[in-house]
Every structure is written in C-alpha cells, then in structure tokens.
Amino acid sequence: MKIPDWTERFEGTRALPRKVRDRLIQVARIVQLKKGEQVFGPTNIPDSLFFLYDGRIRVSQTSDNGREIVLYRVDAGESCVLTTACMLAEEAYNAEGIAETDITAVVLPKPAFDRLAAEEDAFRNFVFGAYSRRLIDLLRVVDDVAFGRIDVRLAERLLHLAGDRKEISATHQQLASELGTAREVISRVLQDFQKREMIAQSRGRIALLNKSALMNLANSA
Amino acid sequence: MKIPDWTERFEGTRALPRKVRDRLIQVARIVQLKKGEQVFGPTNIPDSLFFLYDGRIRVSQTSDNGREIVLYRVDAGESCVLTTACMLAEEAYNAEGIAETDITAVVLPKPAFDRLAAEEDAFRNFVFGAYSRRLIDLLRVVDDVAFGRIDVRLAERLLHLAGDRKEISATHQQLASELGTAREVISRVLQDFQKREMIAQSRGRIALLNKSALMNLANSA
DNA sequence: TCGCCTTGGGTGACAATGTCACTGAAGGGG
DNA sequence: CCCCTTCAGTGACATTGTCACCCAAGGCGA
C-alpha cells in the first residue's frame, strides 16, 4: 500500500520543504487496521509517532470493574499523542485506542521523529499543539465527569453523534460507555427524554424528535 | 534576584553544554510569587515556558457552580506545561495554578524556548516528557473521578498529604476541593473514619491514628 | 414456521454521593 | 468578654450507581 503524498494531509508536514517530505515518505510505514481493532493499549505500546491519515480512532479508558469512558477521538489529519506520551513517560496507564472505522495511518519511527522535531519548526509546533489539544480535551472530560449532570451530558452527546442527521444507531450500553456511566442510568434518562417527546426509541436506534429542546438542555450546564 | 546556576536543577537543562546554559541564564527571567498568588489562570495566560525552581504549584479546575478539583501539583524541578499548552492550543480552559508555597520560577521567553527546543535534544525530550506525565496525571484523575469511591480517594489523599507525619492541617472544605466533591460529603466520610478510629479530628486538623487501616482502604480500589 | 438463544432494554429496591437549608461550635480580634 | 467569621454537623431530599431480576426483539437453525 502506498499513498502518493500523505504529507499534504498533516498540518505538521504540509509546510515542510519538498526534500524533507520526500525523505519522510521513504521512512514512514503505512498501517491499515479494520474497524474495531485495537490501535494501542496497555499491553500494546508502540514506540513511534502515529499520524491518522484516514478514519477515526476512539480513545477510552476502562476501570477495574469494567466501566468505560470515552476520552476523545482522533480524526484524520491528527496525531495520536497518547501513544507517544506513554513511550516517553514510561508510566502505566489503562487507556486504549480502538479503530472506530477502518483506518489508514502513517507510522513514523522514533529516530525520524526526533530528527524532524529537531530540524523543522513547523513539525515541532504541530506536535506540541497536538499535545496541548489533548490536554485541554482531558480538562473538559474531568470537568464533565466531576461536575456535570448526566442528562445534560447525554443530550450533548446525542446531538454530537447525530450531526445533521435525525437518527442515531447506538445501544444504551454504548452511550453509557461514552459517558462513563451505567446502562441503567442511560435507560432511565432516555425514558425521561422520551416522555418529554424529545426522542423516540427503538432497538438500537434513537430518533431526535426535538433537537432544539435537547440543545436547551445541553446548554443549561 | 539572581540564582547562580538554576540550570542545574532541571533535567532538561542540566545536560546542556556550558555555553548554552550561560546564554540561558542571560535571557531567562526569575519570578517570585508569594504563597496563595495565582501563577496562571483563564484570564492570565503567559506566553512563556515556566520552570519551577523552588516551591510547589497546585493546578486545579473550578466548575461553573463553584466546586473545585485539584488536577495535579508541580514540584520544584518540573515544568508547568499547561501554561504552554494554552499558549499553543488557543482554546479556552478554566484551570488555574496557585502557588501553594512561596515560589521561585524561571520564565523562558518563547523565542528562547523555540531555539532551545530546536537545538537541544535533551531539552526537547524534557519538554515532551513533561507533557506526557501531565497527560498521564490527568488520565488518573479521570479514572478516579469517574470510577472511584470517595472514601477510598479520601484515604489516599490523607495518607499522601500526611507523608511521614501523623497529622494534617486541612479543613473539610480544602479536602473537598482536592477531590472535587462537596464539604458535607467529606464531613460524613471523616465522621465514619472517626467512628472506626482511623482518625481523630479537631478544628482544621486531622490526626491519622491508624495508617495501616487507611492504607487497606486506599488499596481496596 | 416454530422455537431457541443472544442481545437490548425495563424495573424496583437499595446504596452512594451531591445539594440545600439549616444549626451550633471554635477561636480570633476588637 | 463579646462579636463575628470560619468551620463543622445534621436531616431531608435529589441524583446517580449497583444489583438482581424481568421481558422483548430479532436472528437463526431445526
């Protein structure tokens, strides 16, 4: 598998001189994974930088008793710094990345990463920026979990998952894993939403009947 | 105020050539703050890298309704990357850093930071490592808040705050802010600990009577 | 088509935690 | 010594998490 010029897709490589980019294309490895496969995890720590060329990765954390929470998502054109984080910090953590769609990624070996970080300002800024955004994503998660109400958070998530569509395919369990809560809690809240005619449910799908009501709820944080 | 050779104190600068360090000492600014002063915050975003030479900074996040949670602490010899994070990511966040003791810090202007990051591997690795550790700190916070029990978390915190001493000076409100919960909750749990003779309380202080019992509780996560 | 069987979802009881509206106690400064 | 601020205790209630179930939907093989 070859991608003619993947460096176009990344803020951190697009601005590099032609010569550098050609060299990069030589040393980088292209990796493809199927939807559902694990990209990284506690027992599977890569020692290279991971650029997501196509697809989406869901990064989540699982507790000892099996509950799960989604930390953030990595979209095409972004870098997954958590892999690098672990590589550098040599500490245990129990987050894992799952391919949410089929994905294509560019894997840069550590030596190439180091050289690039040393020589190219644009690249270095890209990596620092990626770290910063993730830090801020996590601040948001902490805020939500520590201080947010689940009905508000669920409304937000439903709207976000729907995008501009009217319907979502998701089980209660999946939604619970998004928010780091239990299925029963989601069932109760959705029941409530249903009674208030904001949504309609059928097995595995949720129709958003009244988005503006959901938005009101979501913004009443 | 001058510090003869602060570069000795930082992993990221200690390994640098004498010449570079001397130049650093020229361009860096020394800042001192009193205990309780704000180091950075939503309305006070520095555009430089912050090295903590002496003292300790508490980084916490405050919710809209006034509850607070401690995210992590920065100790002498560490860098406070959240300041940098914000500088780079240009996104809003509501974390703030408070000087928990009188502090002395070395502030490196952005141009000097950039040059150093480009030219010196040791420095760059130090900064990447600092980011990584903070990311992992936050993963731990998310895990605790989303999945942990407060009695367990409180026991941990008491032991940690005590260090090798037997007594802690802290109000229930302060402990609540550490864990991101409400004062009443802390009061109830401490009451319980007291009944079980693990601690004794007086106004503003807590004596740890039975540390091993607390450790048992803390490890029963 | 019928009858599993797996998966998704509903429910009630209870436990843990958060919120509210108070109360009184402790201790410092006029 | 009194007042006043800060700290801590309390009961009632709301929200969220846990447990032990139940039933329903729908796929699939007999």
Image (cartoon, coloured by chain):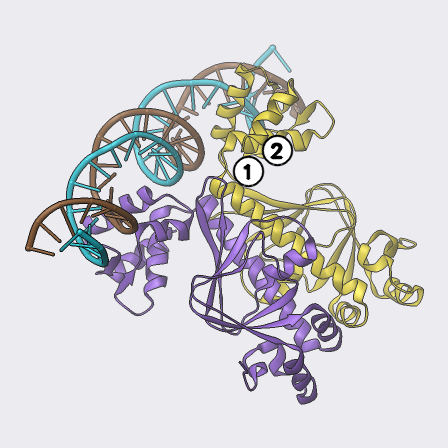
Chain colours: A purple, B yellow, C brown, D cyan
Measuring from the top left, give residue B28's x and y in whole percent. 82, 62
Q: Is residue A26 above or below residue A159?
A: below
Measuring from the top left, give residue A62's x and y in whole percent. 49, 47
User: Relative to residue B169, is residue B182 drawn left or right?
Assistant: left
Discs 2 and 1 carry the same chain letter: yes
User: Relative to residue B113, is residue C14 drawn left or right?
Assistant: left
Q: Is residue A165 above or below residue A181?
A: below
Task: Say what secondary structure mark 1 lies in.
Answer: helix
Q: Is residue A169 visible?
A: yes
Q: How many marks?
A: 2
- Name the residue that disc number 2 marks: B157
Q: Quadrant of residue D17?
A: top left
Residue density around tag 1, few if under 14, some if 14–19, many if 20 or more, within 10 Å = many
Query: Which mark is first along the chain, 1 or 2?
Result: 2
Measuring from the top left, give residue B86's x and y in whole percent. 61, 62
Q: Is residue B134 above or below residue B210?
A: below
- What whole-number distance in Å separates the C-alpha atoms at marks 2 and 1? 8 Å
Q: Are marks 2 and 1 in contact (CB under 8 Å)?
A: yes
**Residue B179 - label:** 1
